[in-house]
Amino acid sequence: MISEVGNKAFQPPYQDCEWPEKLRPIGDCGGRSEESFGEWWDRCGMQRLGHLPKNFVEQWVYRHWDYTVHRYFDLERIKVSLESWLPDQFLSNVASAIDEVFEPESDLTRWSDEFGRPTKEPLISLLSQEATWDYPPIVFGTANGFFNKDRILVQKPFMLIEGHTRRLALNALVHRGLALPQQPVFVIQEI
């Protein structure tokens, strides 16, 4: 169980980052598996994680097996809700537990050409043209903030679990003045 106690900030047990080995995609090597998501889902995902949204499982567990620092969640003891958040709500309430620069000018530079125009990067194009992202980011509610990997207290109500690039892209586009509608966000809760 990883819940907060009283009014203390959430302290993720980063050192205990292990999901059951049975769930590891076959041939997994830095997110590139020899086993397709459909094969993996049939082999183990549906049986163990069928209570979770399939696209949530594909994006976080299957695609980010080797990348996520948040493998301390007991996947069989969480529930996930899909919510709609305004971009400003997402940007002001969500922070990352990993070290990342989060400032609009830096984010704008990352996704702009030498003239300041948005690049053709697929995520930027998708957000700019279709006003939504490909997969909802994943967050975990932390009423009293949380400690990041460097043990620094982050006083935000939600910790970003997956979707770091989408968060930075959203920050750049909102700063650029692009008006975006509400965006889908997966919110994890323990059960």
Image: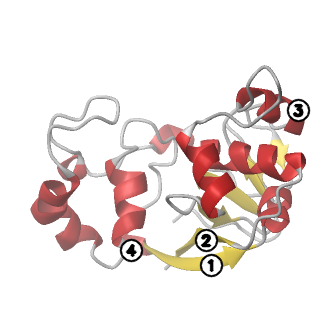
Residue type pointed to by label 1: Glu
Q: Secondary structure at mark 1?
A: strand
Judge left or right: residue 128 versus residue 77: right
Q: Secondary structure at mark 3?
A: helix
| Residue designated by label 3 | 105
Which residue is rendered at x = 28% and y = 34% of the image? Answer: 32
Q: CA distance from mark 2 to mark 3?
A: 25 Å
Q: Residues within 10 Å of mark 3 (few under 14, many from 20)?
A: few
Q: Is residue 162 visible?
A: no
Q: CA distance from mark 1 to mark 3?
A: 28 Å
Earlier in the chain: of badge 4 and badge 3, it is 4
| Residue designated by label 4 | 53
Q: Secondary structure at mark 4?
A: loop
Q: CA distance from mark 4 to mark 2?
A: 13 Å
Earlier in the chain: of badge 4 and badge 1, it is 4
Residue in the foreground of this view, choosing between 15 and 104: 104
Residue type pointed to by label 4: Pro
Which mark, by number, is residue 83? 1
| Residue designated by label 2 | 184
Number of the front mark, 4 or 3? 3
Earlier in the chain: of badge 4 and badge 2, it is 4
Which mark, by number, is residue 171? none
Number of the front mark, 1 or 3? 3
Residue type pointed to by label 3: Glu
Judge left or right: residue 68 versus residue 8: left
Earlier in the chain: of badge 2 and badge 3, it is 3
Q: Residues within 10 Å of mark 2 (few under 14, many from 20)?
A: many
Residue in the foreground of this view, choosing between 76 and 30: 30
